Image (cartoon, rainbow, N blue to C red):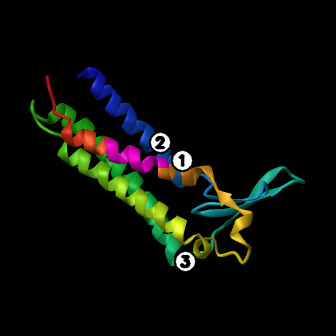
């Protein structure tokens, strides 16, 4: 039982860290080696100073929905972890972690929706007149997709997890 409890906790913390990285880092779309776009900024690499110069992205409805869904996923996963810790100490023996599992599953649905929106509407989100075939998805986008099954698995595990002594 202790091993299962520790495994679920580690899985939850790993997915929460992955969600934070996917939401805040600068690599959702990569245009070659010198330009990166994310949910918040478009960055260009300046070779003269060897620094990244970033400007805010052009806001549109699709981008705002992806931003909101990713932030919601972080919030729901954080609430889920806090509820789990609270339930772990306050819930009577034999109780199930329904609230924790539902919050974690809802976080999975929000990441899934955000990733789908970015996948199908990247032309409108990126707003560039350039050909999208010159760019590729970045590691934050891939992390977001990896979070989806991990969040669903941990949500199901929480729903079936019963508190023992």
Picture residue at 65% right of the left edge, 76% below the top: 127
What is the spatial separation of the Cα atoms under label 2 and label 1, in whole angstroms?
6 Å
Residues drawn in magenta = 146-153
Spatial CA distance of label 1 from label 3 is 22 Å
Residue ID for mark 3: 60
| Residue 26 is inside the magenta segment | no
Is residue 150 a member of the stretch shown in magenta?
yes
- Which residue is label 1 attached to? 21
Seen in the picture, residue 95 relative to 38 is either above or below; the reply is above
Q: Which of 66 and 58 is in front in this view?
A: 66
Q: Residue at x 63, y 54 (%)?
A: 138
Q: What element carries label 3?
A: loop
Q: What residue did someone put label 2 on?
A: 17
Q: Percent x, y for residue 12?
A: 37, 38
Q: In which quarter of the image is residue 82?
A: top left
User: From mark 3 to mark 2, how far is it between C-alphas?
Assistant: 27 Å
Of residue 16 and residue 86, the one placed in the foreground of this image is: 16
């Amino acid at each position: 039982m202790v091993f299962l409890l520790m495994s679920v906790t580690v899985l939850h913390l790993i997915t929460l860290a992955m969600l934070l990285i996917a939401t805040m880092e600068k690599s959702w779309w990569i245009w070659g080696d010198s330009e990166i776009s994310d949910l918040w900024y478009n960055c260009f690499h300046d070779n003269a100073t060897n620094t990244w110069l970033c400007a805010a992205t052009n806001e549109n409805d699709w981008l705002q929905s992806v931003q909101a869904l990713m932030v919601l996923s972080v919030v729901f996963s954080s609430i889920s972890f806090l509820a789990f810790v609270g339930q772990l100490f306050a819930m009577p023996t034999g109780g199930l972690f329904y609230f924790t599992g539902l919050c974690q599953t809802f976080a999975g649905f929000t990441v899934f929706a955000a990733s789908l929106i970015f996948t199908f509407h990247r032309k409108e989100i990126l707003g560039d007149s350039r050909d999208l075939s010159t760019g590729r998805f970045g590691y934050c986008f891939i992390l977001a997709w990896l979070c989806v099954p991990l969040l669903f698995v941990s949500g199901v595990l929480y729903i079936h997890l019963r508190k023992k002594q």
